[in-house]
Amino acid sequence: MSDSQSRKERERQRRTEEILEAAEKVFTEKGFHRTTVEDVAVQAEYSVGTLYNFFPSKELLYQSMIEHRFQRLSDQMNALLAEAADPMDFLRRYIQGKIDLCYQHELFVKLYTQERMGDRFADSQLWKDKIEDLYVQFRRLLADNFRRGAAEGRFRRDITPEDMVSALEGLTDGFMYDWLADPNAFEYADKFEVMFELLVHGVGKPS
């Protein structure tokens, strides 16, 4: 590969990222149906023709943005969890990592939450084609950690790892949804210990 080709590829990657960042902002603010390609072009400071050279349709732009951002979040979380010392450390890292990523990628988290709870994933192939495999793989990773922790005597054995994953996601997502709905009510970051204690020890009064 020539140096000229390499420069061209880097330039195309840079422009692609700028367009995806603009799309993330506009889709979050206006939603899929009210967003136009022209809106994204203006935000990215590119011509409409240039944008179409990268993404031939609004649907493809939207799908690419969702897939790219979800993959980035997944990669960041996997890197964080790979350093866990044991199943309990893994759990703490997951909860803290989810909080940190929500702050780092707040726009996308808002958009993904809106879309995941709406009908965009249900009435198209976006979820099945782009996201479902990553989501399933990640739930398996969480379940494997609970399974390993149960084998080591750190977690209960009378609850399936899959149910533990659902409890973990329900707890962390619940606080996240409340925070996204009203960021002034509380800081999501301040709820780390609450979420960890509730998951590990429950709501029963300590004996």
Image (tube, rainbow, N blue to C red):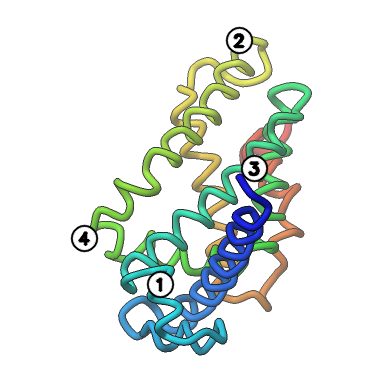
* Mark 3 or 2, closer to the camera: 3
* Picture layout, residue 29 above or below residue 175: below
For the residues labelled 4 and 3, the Cα–Cα distance comes to: 28 Å
* Mark 1 or 3, closer to the camera: 1
Secondary element at image label 2: helix
For the residues labelled 1 and 3, the Cα–Cα distance comes to: 32 Å
Secondary element at image label 3: helix
Between discs 1 and 3, the one toward the N terminus: 1
Drawn side of residue 129 relative to residue 149, left or right: left
Q: Name which residue type carries label 3.
A: Met
Query: x%, y% of residue 166?
Result: 46, 38
- Cβ atoms at labels 4 and 1 below 8 Å apart: no
For the residues labelled 4 and 1, the Cα–Cα distance comes to: 27 Å
Q: Residues within 10 Å of mark 1 (few under 14, many from 20)?
A: few
User: Which residue position is annotated with label 2?
Assistant: 151
User: Which residue position is annotated with label 1?
Assistant: 53
For the residues labelled 2 and 1, the Cα–Cα distance comes to: 53 Å
What residue sits 51% from the left and 89% below the top? 42
Q: Name which residue type carries label 2.
A: Ala
- Cβ atoms at labels 2 and 4 below 8 Å apart: no
Q: Nearer the viewer, residue 18 or 157?
A: 18
Secondary element at image label 4: loop
Drawn side of residue 128 relative to residue 143, left or right: left
What number is the disc on residue 115? none
Q: Name which residue type carries label 4.
A: Asp
User: Which residue position is annotated with label 3?
Assistant: 77
